[in-house]
Image: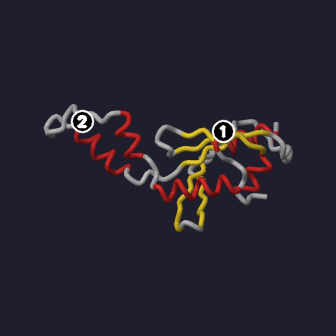
Amino acid sequence: MAAMLASFALLTSLISLAVAAPSAYVYRTKEEIAPPHGWIKQGRPSGNQTITLRVGLPQHNFHILEDNLYQVSDPDHVRYGQHLSKGEVEALVAPHPESLDAVNKWLSSFGFEGDHLVRSPANDWVTITLSLEKAEEMLDTV
């Protein structure tokens, strides 16, 4: 039960990386979900338990996407009904190249590259499956 609780908490937490400088990483939890009613913490889960971690990268042009949404939704705007293509949306929400490079270097420093990573089409989310022990090491939560 404790292992399930730890997995639940970790799986539902979204970790966003805000890159202050290419050599410095700032980690923050975007949200935390309270355990279901009646669950009781019984101890520390095994370090070899596998979890899925999602890393969200900042979308530096999201404000432009939002402006486009308002324009194409406003019947009085000249762009009304001229929706963006999937590729145009992905280009707008793609992370800044420096952010992407910093996250790639961070993941690579822990041995995660290529087939270990699942990326969203816009590269704004990276999903990895790893042991709880490795996640604690990466996030310095040991």
Q: Which mark is residue 73?
A: 2
82 left or right of 88 in image: left
Are there few (<14), some (14-19), or many (20+) residues within 10 Å of tag 2? some
Element type at marker 1?
Answer: helix
Q: Is residue 72 left or right of residue 119?
A: left
Q: Position of residue 69 (x, y in %)?
A: 29, 40
The residue at 84%/47% (across/down) is: 44
For disc 1, the marked residue is: 115
Q: Give the mark, 2 or 1, whose residue is nearer the N terminus.
A: 2
Amino acid on which the number 1 mark rests in the picture: Asp
Q: Nearer the viewer, residue 118 or 39?
A: 118
- Identify which residue is drawn at 79% across, 58% down: 142
Q: CA distance from mark 2 to mark 1?
A: 39 Å
Amino acid type at circle 2 is Ser
Asked whether 32 or 20 is in front, the reply is: 20
Residue 114 screen position, x and y as percent = 64, 42
Residue 105's spot in the image, x, y percent?
Answer: 62, 57
